[in-house]
Each structure stands twice: as structure tokens, then as C-alpha cells.
Amino acid sequence: MAEKRDYYEVLGLQKGASEEEIKKAFRKMAMKYHPDRNPGDKDAEEKFKEVNEAYSILSDADKKSKYDRFGFAGVDPNAGFGGDGGFGGFSGFGGTSSGFGGFEDIFSDLFGGGFSGFGGSSARARTAPTKGRDLQKNVTIEFTDAAFGCKQQVQLTKLVRCSKCNGDGAAPGTSKRQCPKCHGTGTVTTVQNTAFGSFQSTRPCPDCNGTGSIIDTPCPDCHGTGSIRKTLKIDIDIPAGVDTGSVIPIRGQGEPGLNGGPNGDLYIVINVKPHKLFERDGSDLYLEIPITFSQAALGDDIQVPTLSEKVQYKIPAGTQPGTVFRLRGKGVKDLKGNRYGDLYVKVQLEVPTKLNSKQRKAIEEMEAAVDQNCYQKKSSFANKVKDFLGL
């Protein structure tokens, strides 16, 4: 299978293109590769699918934002970002991706109507159930909470379904009525004759604003919208192993859908505070521990802190500065499994400072007592210098 191309590349655009640039590029590409213009051309059909898929993502502000941040993973329903259509995606040729189906729909977008030579109206069902808007909430947690998991409570201000009218929009005891102008379709159609032929133009009904219904007595709480803005507290479980940039989907905690559609989803984006001792790379931890000259030269048992306990580790005699020791399984739990990472401990030799005369004398006596052959690296370097200088 061919590797998926970048959506901006598909439309011939640079990242950061404006909404108008994206729409203009789509029109051009869709007209070029539409199967009605290229009958029997499988290559053109595949490219038309590719163009539609790219437009379905980049024309939606929410999906475009997630694609810009996370790439294909941000709009892949199997990648943990969108789930069951959470971010949406391309439904395949002849489906509903981006709201563009047949060739007449492109003419509709270009000229404001449907081309009559391709089967009449391109009207959209504006009263169909629509999923609610997805929401995003950034949450900052402690380093150890990310490693072991935790429970958090987030505060979120969002639209919720009006409890007084149960989202209907009409005051209790009353009901909506079908719009007499559009007969409940939500759209009105006109025919325009041009030099290119007759074009059928479909627009939202001005009387009902495209809803197909008239509310004579709006709900006093939501004023006929079916939803109200409210501040809520939501409890969330953060699994062990999350890291900065991890995204946790909370299904159904977005804003309410339209016309009976499902609620959108809430996406928790994690930010992890730095730790005073540890640095993290994936599920592995890194720690630097200062040791003295005598510990390095003679060896010693040192205490090594981990995220959950202190462990004893024996430094062998002759340990060199910068040596890294590995403690298996003392890292962070892998987010996608039960494996734990490792802890890498780097020892740094600390040279004493601010010595008094007695201490200086002790070091001088030690230096005089230690044979120069004990310093293998120093001796090797001196020999290399002699060879280089021809001495």
C-alpha cells in the first residue's frame, strides 16, 4: 500500500494555509480529478478520494488543529484520539466525506447551486442528526502522578443540553411546528439560468434558519437553542505512564449534538511538571549521582533513589567519572502495556574545593604514594603525545 501523503501536499498547499486557500485548492483539484470528468480512469478516481480526504480534515477547524499538532495520528480513529468518529475522517468514495459527493456538488460550491445536467438538486439534509463539538482541556500534573496514575477533577465551561426543555428548544407544554416555507427540509431551492446552463441553487431556509422547524414559544432557559452554557466539574482517571503530550479521550463529555445527534468528546491533553532529580525518556528514567574520589577509586555501596523506594547499589573499585549503571525495571510503566522501563544512573566525580592545609597535605601525600601506572588513561595519553611529537 502506498504511503499516505501529507494533506497539505495533496492540495498543493503549505502548512498554515488559510480557509479560503484550502477551499480554492480543493475546488481546483476536485474539478481536475472528478470521476465524471475522467470516466474509467482509476488513477483519477484514487486521486479524487485523496483530495476529498485531505479536504475533509483541513476544512474542519478542529480536525485541522489536531492534524497540525499530531499528524495522521490526530485524525486516525484507531490511534486513541478520535475513537468512534471522534475526529471524523474520510468515508470513502461516494460517501459523505467533507460534504462533497457528485460532480454537481462541486458546481454548487463554485456557482452557488447544482448543475441541472447531473441529476438535479444537491440539497443537504440540514435537519439530520449531527454529532456535537469536541472539546479540549489541558491538564498539568506532577511527575510522580504521571508515573503511577492518578485521579483528577477538571473544571469545564461548555454547552449542555437544556434540562427544562430536554434540548427541544420549545417551552414546556408547547412544541415545534413544521416550517411552512421549506416544509421541514430546512432548505429552499431556486433555479438560475446562466451561459453554462441551468443551475439549481439550494440555500438554508431564511424563515427557520435551516432547522426545518418554527418555535413559537421558545424555552425561557435556553431561548430556543436547546442548550445552555454551564460550568461543570468532571472526574477523570489518568492512567500510569502518561507523558507530556499524551491525549486521553473522554467519550460523550463534549457539547450536545444537534437534532438528536450524539454528544461530542472531551480530549484531555497532559502536561507533566519536571522532577527535581529524574529526567524521563519514554518509560526510562535518568539520574545523576555525585561520588567522591575515594568512592570511585575504592568502590562503595551507595543509596540510589527511585520513584518508589531507595535501593543499595555497589560501585566497583576503579569506577570512572561518567560511568552509567542500569537498574532494570526501576523506570516508568509503559502506557500501552505492563512493562516497566529502566533507571540509568550516571556517576559524576566531585572534586573537593576549599581545602585547608591539612587536607591539602593529605592529598599530596596520597598523590606521592600512588604509582603513576595506576593512571592508565593518563599514561596512554602521555605515550600518544610522545609518538605525535616524535619524542
Image (cartoon, rainbow, N blue to C red):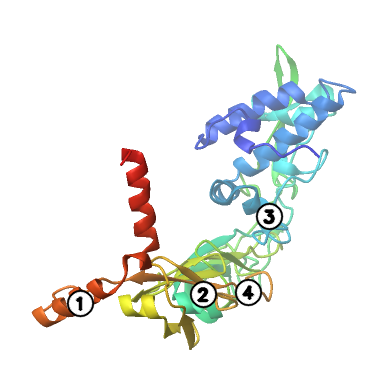
Mark 3 nearby-residue class (10 Å; few <14, some 14–19, many ≥20): many
Query: As shown in the figure, which amino acid type bears the numbered disc 2?
Result: Ala
- Dot placed on the residue nearer the N-terminal end, 3 or 2: 2
Q: Earlier in the sequence, mark 1 or mark 3?
A: 3
Residue picked out by circle 4: 172
Q: Regarding mark 3 in the picture, which secondary structure is present there? A: strand
Give me the residue at 13% from left, 74% from top: 354
Q: With respect to residue 167, does 14 lie above or below?
A: above
Amino acid marked by disc 1: Glu
* Residue identifier under label 2: 146
Question: Depth check: 7 or 255 in front?
Answer: 7
State the separation of the CA atoms marked 4 and 3.
16 Å
SS for dot 4: loop
Inspect the image, locate mark 3, and give the three-letter code of the amino acid beneath it. Ser
- Pointer 2 with pointer 1, Cβ within 8 A: no
Mark with earlier residue (4, 1): 4
> From mark 4 to mark 1, how far is it between C-alphas?
97 Å
For residue 306, say whether it is visible.
no
- Marks 2 & 4, CB-CB < 8 Å contact: no
Q: Which residue is mark 1?
A: 365
Residue 320 visible in this rendered orientation of the protein:
yes
Tag in front: 2 or 1: 1
Give residue 213's mark: 3
Label 1 to label 3: alpha-carbon separation: 98 Å
Give the CA separation, mark 3 to mark 2: 49 Å
* Earlier-in-chain disc, 2 versus 1: 2
Q: Is residue 286 above or below residue 123?
A: below
